[in-house]
Amino acid sequence: MQENKRALVLLNMGGPRNKEELKMFLTNMFNDRNIITVKNELVRKMIAYFIVRGRLDEAWENYEAIGGKSPINEIR
């Protein structure tokens, strides 16, 4: 009988320390071809731009609620 095995991989992708770093972090993340799997680089960059533009302020509000920076930086 074959056993189904599963794994969970957690990645520490770092975290922003201010709003400008948050913008760069989100831009880099959504420009990654493994996150947005659109093959056309220009289209992927446009999608990333609109996602970041639409989510930056709301995402920053979440960071402000936890101290204005990612707590992951304190763990390192």
Image (spheres, rainbow, N blue to C red):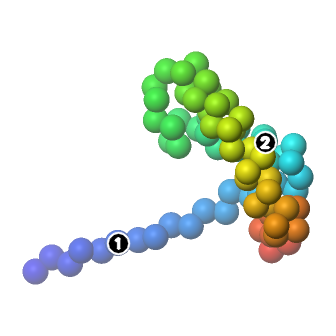
Q: Which residue is mark 2?
A: 23
Q: Is residue 7 visible?
A: yes
> Where, by quadrant of the figure, is residue 70 drawn?
bottom right
Q: Position of residue 43 (x, y in %)?
A: 54, 21
Cβ atoms under marks 2 and 1 closer than 8 Å: no
Q: How many neighbours does mark 2 have within 10 angstroms: few (below 14), some (14-19), or many (20 or more)?
A: many
**Left or right for 7, reference 10:** left
Q: Residues within 10 Å of mark 1 (few under 14, many from 20)?
A: few
Whichever of callouts 2 and 1 sits on the residue coming sooner in the sequence is: 1
Quadrant (top left/top right/bottom left/bottom right) for the C terminus? bottom right
State the residue at coordinates (68%, 57%). Answer: 13
Amino acid type assigned to the residue bearing label 1 in the image? Arg
* Residue 57 location (% of width, % of height): 78, 46
Name the one closer to the observer, 13 or 47. Answer: 47
Element type at mark 1: loop
The kind of secondary structure element at disc 2 is helix
Q: Which residue is mark 1?
A: 6
In the displayed structure, 42 sits above or below 50; it is above
Amino acid at circle 2: Lys
Q: Residue 65, percent across and down?
A: 82, 67
Residue at image position (58%, 29%) is 47
Question: Which residue appears at 87% of the width and 56% of the height?
Answer: 17
Q: Is residue 39 left or right of residue 44?
A: left
> At which x and y percent is residue 18?
89, 52
Cα separation, mark 2 vs mark 1, equals 34 Å
